[in-house]
Image (tube, rainbow, N blue to C red):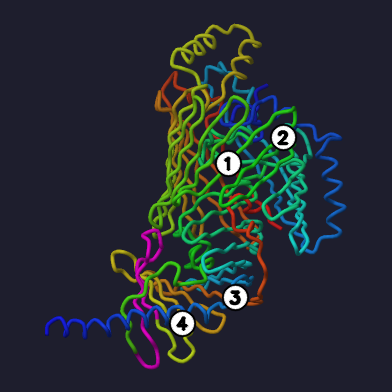
């Protein structure tokens, strides 16, 4: 009897986990359905006193966990290239003439870390856990698969109809909320939860399918192509 | 006359010895000459007309450097007039890249021009190479290439064919590095990258790289020299690295705090530095030097941060309204140290202004007490395009 009750309780829990995985997969699919692509990213960072800075990148992706970020602007950053292979990252600078291993926390600019720009997929880094519903949205609790991932936990709001992400709260190991991202079509706003008023807006344009050669995604070829 | 350019360790003084390409190799690269580099430069310019993607970027800067003499230095013997108090310089460096949409080939040029009121004007080709990809797993490169081996921040014990770094300016802020003439083959096979080098002067080298369980591992080979370099990220903020070759070793790491402060710490052992006995002998020779030629010879022999065998390095960097970088390098033997503070401000998206101050500290008879200047203060602007 007890076994039957436990079994009856476990079935919905299992279904819930599968649901969460499916929702997350469809969310990633909605963000980027191309297996090999290129997209322009413009990143504008503003502070409470009104100062703002703009950077531009060209992001080349292949599969769900490989990307190369080419720095286009400002001029001070031109020529730099970032490679991300799952959670491993290297940056190439023309002056250094070699790829340097860096950690995910090192920032490109403003509130956006390297990972924020280079990462195009939640499934690679996060395991979905609990799932809930709220006003036309799924709420997913995502747990980092690896301690190397910059944010230990993510709470993700997903539109129930379109499966597009609406909002994501990023937490560190201590449980502190670090960042809040708000998603719109081809636009993400990132607010710094620790420093109110500090905001970074990422805009995506010119997303195209493009056959990126395998060689682009090797550390030793970084900056050479 | 002893100029600041001779006494402050500088990337422009060229590589040599441990952690840098052999002097013979690098000397041979100095004159651009009618060599492989010139041919490649011309080919590159011709090919660029057929490129779909053409990139031109770089920077131009002007700066003034103050180097008040250190009359307490035994190498000056109180003759402070021998040190140039002020040096003004300007430079421009341009990177030119061109490739077709298929990226089957690429050309790359790094051109540099320098003007200096002490050392005169010069122009150089830092890099000029053509690269082809005859197969998806193979790249062939011919021309002058800057190869940077190793994972260390301030020193690279495995940098057998790389420009020697200046630990007090490891980032080559003026892009002054110059490459070696070479033909290089990069082979990419199942996650392992093998690079084979045929260098000027009939020298051969090889490097093998693979990412193993999240750790960068490279093996470096050149004639009788072999080395290994490693790097790995732990968690989201800590990176540890190490390098070792014959008589040279380095261990270090960097940590990025949540407030975007980045800290790098390294310890270095260079077996070709002076032992305590050799340093004592050097000091005795300096003390016994009676004529100007002997003093000049001692000045040439004295190279800061190479007069000992063990050094420690720390760097703290933070970006903000004003970017700040503090570098400290200390001799483990006698505790003498240099500290270099850089403050830079982005005036416009393409214009930086900066002030750099380097101070030296150490008791009498220590390595830094011999340095011929009290401090080095630099102020300048750099325009990026």
Same chain for marks 3 and 4?
yes
Magenta residues, start to end: A134-156
Image side of residue B198 versus residue A34, left or right? right
Q: Where is residue A158 in the image (x, y as percent from the top left)?
A: 42, 84
Q: Is residue B306 above or below residue B238?
A: above
Q: Is residue B81 above or below residue A123?
A: above
On the image, which quarter does residue A42 sit in?
bottom right
Instruction: Find disc 2 in the rendering and name its residue.
Output: B198
Depth check: give the residue in front, B97 or B131: B131
Residue B383 visible? The answer is no
Q: Marks 3 and 4: which is nearer the front?
A: 3
Q: How far apart are marks 4 and 2 (CA)?
A: 52 Å
Same chain for marks 3 and 2?
no
Residue count near mark 3 (Cα–Cα under 10 Å), binned few <14, some 14–19, many ≥20? some
Label 2 secondary element? strand
Depth check: give the residue in front, B97 or B330: B97
Protein chain holding label 1: B
Q: Marks 1 and 4: which is nearer the front?
A: 1
Instruction: Find disc 3 in the rendering and name its residue.
Output: A34
């Amino acid at each position: 009897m007890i076994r039957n009750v436990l079994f009856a309780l476990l079935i919905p829990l299992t279904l819930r986990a599968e649901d969460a995985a499916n929702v997350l997969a469809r969310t990633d699919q909605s963000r980027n359905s191309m297996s090999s692509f290129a997209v322009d990213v413009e990143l504008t960072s503003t502070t409470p006193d009104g100062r703002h800075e703009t950077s531009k990148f060209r992001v080349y992706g292949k599969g769900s966990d490989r990307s190369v970020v080419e720095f286009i602007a400002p001029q001070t950053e031109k020529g730099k290239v970032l490679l991300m292979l799952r959670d491993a990252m290297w940056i190439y600078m023309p002056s250094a003439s070699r790829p340097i291993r860096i950690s995910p926390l090192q920032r490109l600019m403003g509130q956006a870390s390297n990972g924020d720009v280079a990462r195009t997929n939640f499934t690679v880094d996060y395991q979905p856990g609990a799932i809930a519903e709220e006003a036309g949205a799924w709420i997913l609790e995502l747990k980092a698969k690896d301690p190397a991932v910059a944010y230990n936990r993510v709470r993700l709001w997903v539109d129930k109809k379109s499966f597009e992400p609406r909002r994501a709260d990023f937490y560190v190991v201590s449980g502190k909320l670090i960042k809040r991202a708000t998603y719109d079509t081809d636009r993400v706003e990132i607010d710094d939860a620790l420093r109110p008023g500090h905001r970074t807006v990422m805009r995506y344009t010119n997303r195209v399918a493009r056959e990126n050669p395998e060689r682009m995604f090797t550390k030793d070829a970084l900056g050479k192509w | 006359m002893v100029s600041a350019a001779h006494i402050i360790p500088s990337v422009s003084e060229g590589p040599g010895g441990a952690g840098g390409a052999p002097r013979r190799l690098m000397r041979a690269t100095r004159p651009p000459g009618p060599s492989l580099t010139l041919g490649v430069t011309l080919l590159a310019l011709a090919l660029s007309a057929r490129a779909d993607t053409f990139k031109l970027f770089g920077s131009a800067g002007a700066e003034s450097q103050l180097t008040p003499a250190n009359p307490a230095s035994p190498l000056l013997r109180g003759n402070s007039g021998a040190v140039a108090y002020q040096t003004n310089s300007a430079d421009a460096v341009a990177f030119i890249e061109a490739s077709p949409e298929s990226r089957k080939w690429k050309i790359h040029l790094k051109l540099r021009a320098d003007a200096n009121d002490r050392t005169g004007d010069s122009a150089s080709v830092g890099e000029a190479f053509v690269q082809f990809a005859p197969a998806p797993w193979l790249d062939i490169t011919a021309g002058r290439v800057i190869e940077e081996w190793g994972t260390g921040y301030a020193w690279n014990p495995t940098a057998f064919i790389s420009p020697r770094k200046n630990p007090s300016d490891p980032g080559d802020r003026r892009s002054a590095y110059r490459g070696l003439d070479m033909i290089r083959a990069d082979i990419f096979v199942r996650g392992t990258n093998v690079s084979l080098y045929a260098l000027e002067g009939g020298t051969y080298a090889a490097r093998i790289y693979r990412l193993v369980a999240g750790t960068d591992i490279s093996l470096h080979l050149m004639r009788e020299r072999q080395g290994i370099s490693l790097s790995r990220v732990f968690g989201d903020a800590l990176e540890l690295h190490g390098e070792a070759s014959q008589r040279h070793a380095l261990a270090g790491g960097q940590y990025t705090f949540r407030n975007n402060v980045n800290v790098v710490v390294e310890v270095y052992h260079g077996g070709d530095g002076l032992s305590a006995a050799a340093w004592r002998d050097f000091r005795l020779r300096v003390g016994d030097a009676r004529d100007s030629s002997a003093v000049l010879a001692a000045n040439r022999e004295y190279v800061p941060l190479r007069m000992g065998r063990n050094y420690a390095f720390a760097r703290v960097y933070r970006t903000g309204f004003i970017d700040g970088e503090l570098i400290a390098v200390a001799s483990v033997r006698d505790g003498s140290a240099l500290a270099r503070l850089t403050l830079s401000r982005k005036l416009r998206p393409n214009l930086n202004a900066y002030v750099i101050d380097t101070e030296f500290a150490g008791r009498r008879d220590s390595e830094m007490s011999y340095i011929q200047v009290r401090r080095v203060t630099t102020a300048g602007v750099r325009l990026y395009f």
